[in-house]
Structure formats: C-alpha cells, structure tokens
Amino acid sequence: MSAAMGSPGGIAAVAERYLRAVVSRGELDAIDELFDPGHVMHHPAMPDLPDGPRGVREMVERQRRVYPDLVFRVDETLQAGDRVAVRGMMGGTGTGSLLGLPPTGRTIMVAAVYWFRFTGSRIAETWVVIDRLQSAMQQGLVVAPDPSATDPGWT
C-alpha cells in the first residue's frame, strides 16, 4: 500500500524507487541519479559512512554482503513538503558475517522506517530506523524474553 500525499510520483516515487531498485534488487548504478552529491546518511548501526552517494553505496553493499537476498517491502509512504517517510518490512537470509559474528543462515524480516529529505528531486538526507532487537532475536543472537517470566510491572 502506498499512501503518498501530494502528486502521484514525484519525490515519494523516488524514495520508493531507491528502496525497491537499490536496496531490494541491488541496482547500485541508480544511486548517483537518486542522491544529492552532499547527501547525509543517519544510520545508527553505521555511523562511519561517508557523505554523498558513496556512503549510500557503501551502506547497501554492506547490507547485501550479510543478506544477499535483502528486500524492503513498502507498506506505506507519506509525503509532506520536501520529506518522505516510508514504513515497511526489511529482511533476508544471513549468509555473511555480521558484526564479526559468523553467518547464522537464518531468514529475518523486521520493521523498518526510512525518512528522507529532498533537495529538488534528489535525496539529500536519510534517517534509517530498523528494529535491531527483533533482528537479533530472529538471528538467534539474543534470546527472546520468556513470556511466562514474572511481570516486570510494565503493564
């Protein structure tokens, strides 16, 4: 489902194209066309990425080394002015090393949100939020809490 507010296509279509073509299919050649030369990436798990399209390429390459079949399923897209938010599910099969740990071989699918700021028709800034706890639990790197354990009082 895509619920872009404003004209059909436009910058919301650019954001979705990035997620479908570049992230999901690995079409890295589209990065230079979609991203502003001064692009800034905000990704908490990859704070060392360089600015510009080079940083986007490096991020996607790192992700696809761990998950060669990486896919982002777009569930909802919202646009307001020069901002686009895309909510969906992201996942793949962990066949590469992650954070120095051996491959798990497990397939994961976790909630993810990308928030984009545009300059004209190019992505100028990106914020990435991925449910890393769910990712770690699905990969077997973190044990899921026991639902029968004593209530910690959060209810």
Image: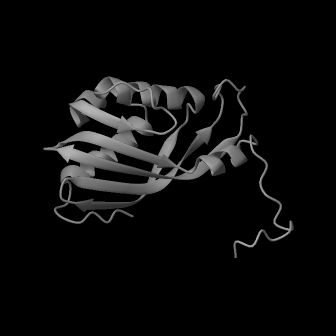
Residue 37 versus residue 134 in the image, above or below: above
Locate residue 52, reporting x and y percent: 28, 27
State how the image is colored.
Answer: one colour
Residue at image point 27% right, 63% down:
4
User: Which quadrant of the rendered structure holds the C terminus?
Assistant: bottom right
Up/down of 136 relative to 85, above or below: above
Residue 93, how many percent across, how many down?
64, 37
Q: Nearer the viewer, residue 101 or 22?
A: 101
- Residue 58 locus on image (x, y percent): 42, 24
Query: Residue furthest toward the bottom?
Result: 155
Percent position of residue 68, x then y:
55, 30
Q: Residue furthest front?
A: 153
Taking depth in this image into account, of 104 and 113 the one nearest to the observer is 113
Q: Is residue 65 left or right of residue 83?
A: right
Task: Identify which residue is drawn at 36% across, 36% down.
Answer: 41
Tally of numbered discs:
0
Specify whether 81 is left or right of 108: left
* Residue at the (41%, 27%) spot, across then down: 49
Residue drawn at point x = 71 percent, y = 48 percent: 137
Q: Where on the picture, by quarter, is residue 106? A: top right
Q: 17 or 47: nearer the eye?
A: 47
Please say if 29 is above or below 85.
Answer: above
Quadrant where the N terminus is found in the figure: bottom left
